[in-house]
Image (cartoon, rainbow, N blue to C red):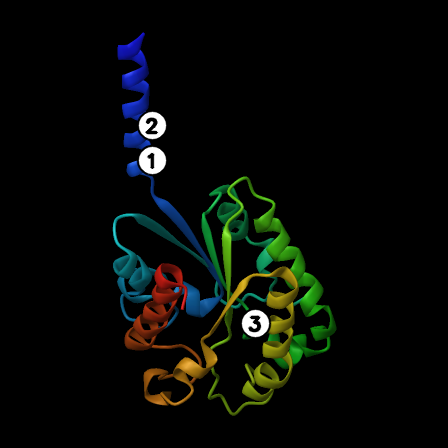
C-alpha cells in the first residue's frame, strides 16, 4: 500500500511539474498575422510562444476581418476558431478585437459593443479552466480612409468602451495602441504590424503574463 501511495504521489508530482499552460490568442487579422512575412513564425502569437517557452502552448485563433460586435459585418463569435478556442479550455486568454469595429459599416452598432464584450468574456470565464483574461486595446491605425479602420473612432469610442468592460469584469488590460503609435514604419500597410511590430507586441504581452506589468 505504501508503495502504491508513493507511486501515485510521484505520478501527481510528475503530471503537475510537466503541465503546460495553454494560451488562446483571440482576434482578427493582426492576431492571425495577415501581411506578416512567414506569419507562422512571425505573428505576435508565434513570437509570444518563443518568449514564453516550453512551459506554455500558445494557439493562434485569429480570423481576419472579424469584429467583436455580434451584429458586425463579420462577427468573431460566429467563427469556427471561436468554438475551437472555447473547446481548448485555455488557462490564459488574450483578446484583440476592436479595430474592425471602427469601420463605417459597423459604427452604428457601437452602442452594442460593451454588452457583446461582456458576453465574450463570460463565455471564457464560465469554462472549467476559469482562465486569466487579458484585453488588448486596438493597435493604432494610420489609414486616412475615414470609412475604414479609423483611428479617431478607435481612440474616442472603442478604447473607452474596452476600459469600461475591463473594469466591470475585473480583467486585465494592455495598451497596444500606445505601443506602436510612434512607429508607422513598422506598419507598412498602415494597419498591420510587420514581423518586428508583432515581436514588440508579443514582448509586451509576455511581460504582462510573466511579470504582471
Q: Secondary structure at mark 2?
A: helix
**Residue 36 visible to an observer of this rendering:** no
State if disc 3 and disc 1 touch (CB < 8 Å): no
Residue 190, x across and y down, in percent: 42, 85
For the residue labelled by badge 1, is the local secondary structure a helix, a strand or a loop? helix
Name the quadrant of the C terminus: bottom left
Q: Earlier in the sequence, mark 1 or mark 3?
A: 1
Residue closest to the far bottom: 144
Residue, disc 2: 12
Task: Give the position of the N terminus as an image quadrant.
Answer: top left
Farthest residue, direction top: 1
Residues 168 and 146: in front is 168
The CA span between labels 1 and 3 is 36 Å
Give the residue number, with chain letter if any, for mark 1: 16
Q: Residues within 10 Å of mark 3 (few under 14, many from 20)?
A: many
**2 or 200: nearer the eye?**
2
Identify which residue is drawn at 62% across, 85% down: 156
Number of on-image labels: 3
Q: Residues within 10 Å of mark 1 (few under 14, many from 20)?
A: few
Q: Is residue 48 visible?
A: yes
Q: Position of residue 28 (x, y in %)?
A: 49, 66
Q: Nearer the viewer, mark 1 or mark 3?
A: 1
**Left or right of residue 102: residue 30:** left
Numbered label attached to residue 98: 3
Sequence-wise, the earlier of marks 2 and 3 is 2
Q: Is residue 40 above or below residue 160?
A: above
Question: What x and y, as percent, mark residue 53?
Answer: 26, 54
Q: Is residue 203 above or below residue 78?
A: below
Residue 196 drawn above or below residue 125: below
Q: CA distance from mark 1 to mark 2?
A: 6 Å
Identify the residue shown where x is 33% and y is 39%: 19
Q: Are marks 1 and 2 in contact (CB under 8 Å)?
A: yes
Amino acid at each position: 500500500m505504501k508503495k502504491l501511495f508513493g507511486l501515485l504521489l510521484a505520478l501527481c508530482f510528475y503530471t503537475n511539474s510537466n503541465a503546460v499552460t495553454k494560451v488562446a490568442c483571440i482576434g482578427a487579422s493582426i492576431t492571425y498575422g495577415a501581411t506578416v512575412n512567414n506569419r507562422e513564425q512571425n505573428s505576435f502569437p508565434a513570437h509570444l510562444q518563443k518568449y514564453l517557452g516550453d512551459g506554455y502552448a500558445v494557439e493562434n485563433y485569429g480570423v481576419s476581418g472579424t469584429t467583436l460586435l455580434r451584429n458586425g459585418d463579420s462577427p468573431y463569435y460566429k467563427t469556427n476558431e471561436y468554438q475551437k478556442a472555447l473547446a481548448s479550455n485555455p488557462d490564459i486568454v488574450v483578446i484583440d478585437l476592436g479595430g474592425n469595429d471602427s469601420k463605417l459599416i459597423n459604427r452604428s452598432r457601437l452602442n452594442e459593443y460593451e454588452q457583446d464584450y461582456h458576453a465574450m468574456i463570460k463565455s471564457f470565464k464560465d469554462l472549467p479552466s476559469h482562465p486569466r483574461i487579458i484585453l488588448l486595446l486596438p493597435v493604432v491605425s494610420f489609414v486616412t480612409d475615414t470609412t475604414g479602420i479609423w483611428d479617431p473612432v478607435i481612440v474616442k469610442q472603442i478604447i473607452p468602451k474596452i476600459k469600461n468592460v475591463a473594469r466591470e469584469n475585473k480583467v486585465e488590460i494592455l495598451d497596444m495602441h500606445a505601443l506602436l503609435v510612434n512607429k508607422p514604419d513598422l506598419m507598412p500597410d498602415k494597419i498591420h504590424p510587420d514581423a518586428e511590430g508583432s515581436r514588440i507586441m508579443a514582448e509586451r504581452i509576455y511581460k504582462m503574463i510573466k511579470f504582471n506589468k
